Image (spheres, coloured by chain):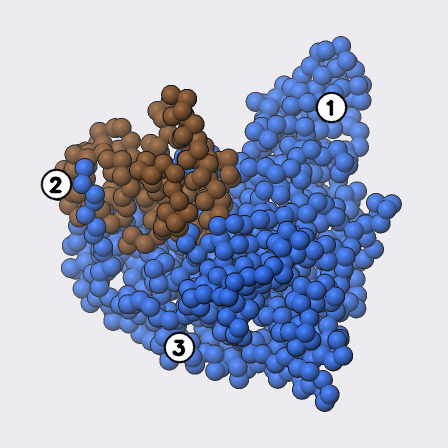
Amino acid sequence: MPKYSFVVNGKAVTVDAPANLSVLWTLRDKLGVTGPKYGCGINVCKACTSHLDGKAFNPCVTYVSDVQGRRITTIEGLADPDGTLHPVQEAWLEQDVPQCGYCQPGQIMAVAALLARTRTPTDAEIDAIENVCRCGTYFRIRKAIKSAAAKIAAREAAG
Amino acid sequence: MSCPDVPGPSGAPAPGPDPGGTSRRRFLSYLVAAPTLAVGVRWAGPASALPVPTAPAPADVLDLGDVLILAAKDTESMLIVLEVRADGTVTCALPREEVGQGITTAVAMLIADELDLPLAKVQVTLADARPELQRGQLTGGSNTIRSVYEPVRQAAATVRARMAAAAARELGVTAGSLSLADGVLTARDGRSLDFGALTGPAADPDLAVGEAEPKAAADLVLVGRPTNRIDAVKMVTGQMDYTLDLDPVPGAARAMVRRPPTLNGTVKSVDNRAAVLAMPGVLGLHVLPTGVAVLAQTFGQALDAKEALKVTWGAGTVDAESNASIFRRLAAAATPVPPAPPGTQVVDAEFTFAPASHAPLETNSAIADIRATGGEVWAGLKSPIVAAQEIAKDLGLPQGSITAHVVQGGGSFGRRLFFDAALEAARISKAARRPVKLMWTRIDDMRHGRARAASYHHVRAVHAAGSVLSLDHSVASVETDFRHGLGEILTAMSAQLPVGGNLSFAQTVFLTTIKSPYDFGRVTQGLQEVPLKMPTGSFRSVYSANTRGAEEVVVDEIAKQQGKDPAAFRREFLKTDRQRAVLAKVVKEGAWGKVMPAGFAQGIAFHDEYKSCTACLVEVDARNPRRPRVTRATIAADYGLPINPRGLEAQLLGGLTDAIATVFRAGLHVVDGLPLEGSYSQFHFARQKDSPRDVRIFVLPATTGTPGGAGELGLPAAVGAVANAYARATRTRVRSFPINFPVDFTPFPRGTGSTRVHVPPPPP
C-alpha cells in the first residue's frame, strides 16, 4: 500500500493507505483525528470542513493522495498551540451558538477561512455559507460571524 | 387547563390539577452508601389521586409529559443521585439523553443554584441505561426539566444541609451560623471548610441534619439567568465525542450495511461474496434482517465494499406505495367531519403534509461489543432501557446482559427515541464475533431511517355572528411507531389516562398532546392511522406541528371571513391572560400590522402545550413564490418558570428553522416504496440563505413557578406563522406541505452503484 506524508495540525504524519481513501476516513480511522464529522460524504453538508494550506476544503471528497506534502488544519488545530482560542471560536462561545454541536467544527472552519479572505463579510456572503445546521442555529451563527469579524479587527488594531 | 393563569397574590399555586404531583415536601432524601457524599431523593407521599377528565380536552387535564412523570413515580426515588467529590465538584449522572436541548446545562444550573457553587464546579454526565428505573428513563415529550426539576433541587438541598451539618460538627459551631459561598462554608470566626474536605464527614449516616428545603424562588440566582452551554467549549474545539468519535473497544471493525431498494426489503442472496471479501481492507460480510453488513478496516473501505455488493432482494413492505397513493389512503381513512348547520359560515380545509426525515446531522451510528454471554453498546439513546432489553431479546441473551451506554447525540428531533443502529450493530458484532463501529450513510439514513409519517387533515370550522361555534379536525396518518417504551408506559398507565375507549397508543399520544388554545365552542380533534409498514418515528412536537399548524392556518381563514385582523381575532378567542400576554408581546415587538410592499407579508400564530405557550410572528418575502424567504421573526414564550432563557431561545430558534424548512421545501417523495431523497442537496432542510437575518426572541419572566415543556414548543406556532405569512404575501390558500416540492434533483440509484465523489483540492 502506498505511503503518504503530510502535516496535520502542525504534526508531520505518514500513513499507509490506498490512494483513493478519502482524507475524512484517513483522519478519523487511521489518525484518530475526529473533529471533522461525517454528515453526507458527498460534499453537500460540509460538516467535515477543514483547512488545506489555509483554505477551506472538504475531506470527505478529497483523496489522501491529493494531500501529499500539504498542510491540513482541523478544528483541533484552529486554536493557538498555547490554547488561546481563535476569534471565531471565541465568538461561537459568546453567542452560545452550538446546540447538538455536530456541525459546528465545520461551520467554524468555514467561517475562519471566510474571514481570512474577507475581513467584513456581507450578509450575502454569509448567506453563501452552505454548511447545514440541522438544529437551525443559523441566526446565532450570523451574529457570531459579525462578532468574530469585529474581534479580529480589534486584535489587529491592538497590534 | 390551558396555559393556566398565574398564581394568586398569596403565592399559592393556581387552582387546578397537579398531575405531576411535584410538591416538594413529598420528597425525602437518602444517603447512597459511598465514601464520599452521595444523595438521592425519594417520593414520600402516596400515589396522587388523578383528576377526573372533565376539562374540554384530555391534554388540558393530563398531558403526555404528566403521563411520563406519573408512569415513573414508583422509581423516582432513584432518578437523581448527586455526588460530592473530594475536589469539591458535584456530579450528576443524568438519566436522560442530551442531543442539543441544553438539558445538562439547565440541570447544572439547578444544582449550582441550590448549592451556591460556581457553575464550573458542577458536572453533569449522561447515565448508562439504568434498568431499575423501569419506565423512568425516556427522553421525550419535552419532559426532561419537567420531570427532574423537583428531584434535582431536593437532592441538592439535601447536599447543602448535610454539608452545613458536617461543617458545624467539625468546627464546633451551629449549622445556622455558617455562611456558604462558592462551595466553602465559613464560620463567624473565619475558619472555613470546603465541600471537598467535607464530603467524607457529610456521608456519616449518624450525622444529625436539619430539614433540607430547596431555596425559595426569590433566593435563586442562576435560575432565570441567561447562561451559556456548559459543553460548548468542547464543541467549538472539536473535543466533544459523539458515538463514532469514541474508541471504547480498540480494534473495532468499521461496519456499513447495504440496504434494499425498497423499504423493509429482504436479502434473497448475495451474489458476489468472494469478490467483495477480496476488496482492500474488507474483514467480513454478514447477512442481516435489514441488509448485508460489510466489515472493513476503515469506513471508506466499508463504503466501497458495500457499494460493490451484488444482492438479490426480496420485496419490501410498501413497494406499491407512493406519496399520491398514501395520501389517497389517508383521505379515505379520515373520520368524516360533521356538516355545518344552515345559516352559518364555514372554513372547510383539507391539508397534506409529506413525510419528513428527522435528518439529524449525525447519522444512525453505534458501537457494539457482543460476547457469548452478553455485551455492551454505545449510542445516542433516548430510551436506553428498552434498547438494552430489546437487543438482549433479539440476540437470545438473558435480560440484564446488555449494558447500554448513552452517548451525547448529534441531533435527534425524535430519531433517537429508537435504537435501530444499536440493535443492528449488536447483531453484526454477534455474527462477526468482534467489536464493531456501525455507521449509516446519509443516503441510507434519509431513505431507510425513520421519518415523520405523512398526514392528512380535514378541518371544518363553523362560525356565525362573530362567534366560532365549532372546530372539528380529523387527522389521518401513516402509522407512527411508538415501540421505544412509550407504548409500555401508556399500557401501564391506561387506567389513569383521561381518555376512554379502546384507543391505540398513537391515539392516546394524540389526545394527550393535541388541544386548542381557543374558545371555539365544540372542538373535536381525532386521529386515525393507516397501518402501512414504513420506518416512522415521532418528529419534534409529534402531531402538533402538522395538526396545530393546520389549525393556525384555519384560524387566519376564519378571521378573514369575519373581516377581522388575525392577531386581534386570536386575542379575542384565546382562553387565558397568560396566552394573551405572549401574543401581545410579539404584536408589539414585531410591529404587527405594519405596511409591507407587494409580495411581502407578516404572519402570526399561537401554540400552547405542556404548560407553556408561545406566539410567533414572521415576515416573508414571497416576491418569487417558488423561493420565499422568511426575512424576520419575532417570537415570545411563557414557560411558567424559565430555567435558562438562553437555552430556551435556542430551542425556539430551532423550532423556527424546522418550520421554515418543512413548510417551504423539506419533505420526502416516497415513490414505489422508497424515498427519492438521499442527501441535504435533495431533502431541502433550511440553510443559512433560507434563514432570517433578524430574529428577536423574548422569554417572558416566570408566571406559574413551575417549568413547562420547551423542546418542541416552538415548532407548531412557527409552522402556522410561516404558512400564514406566505398565504397573505401570495394571496393564496396553503394546503399542501411543503409548499414548493418539486423533484428538483436526480435521485441516487436504488441501492446500486458508487456514490463516490472526488473534488480536487484547491492548489497550495
Residue linked to disc 1: B164
Disc 3 secondary structure class? loop
Whether callout 3 and callout 2 share a subunit is answered: no
Q: Do the residues labelled 2 and 1 touch (CB within 8 Å)?
A: no
Q: For the residue marked with disc 2, what is the amino acid?
A: Pro
Disc 1 secondary structure class? helix
- From this viewpoint, is residue B595 visible? yes
Disc 2 secondary structure class? loop
Residue linked to disc 2: A2
| x and y percentages locating residue B629 in the rendered image | 46, 60
Density class for disc 2 (Cα within 10 Å; few <14, some 14-19, many ≥20) is few
- From this viewpoint, is residue B377 visible? no
Cα distance between the residues tagged 2 and 1: 66 Å
Q: Residue furthest right?
A: B10
Density class for disc 1 (Cα within 10 Å; few <14, some 14-19, many ≥20) is many
Q: What subunit carries mark 1?
A: B
Closer to the camera: disc 1 or disc 3?
Answer: 3
**Which of A45/A14 is in front?**
A45
Chain in brown on the image: A
Chain in blue on the image: B
Residue linked to disc 3: B322
Q: In which quarter of the image is the N terminus of chain B?
A: bottom right
Q: Do the residues labelled 1 and 3 touch (CB within 8 Å)?
A: no
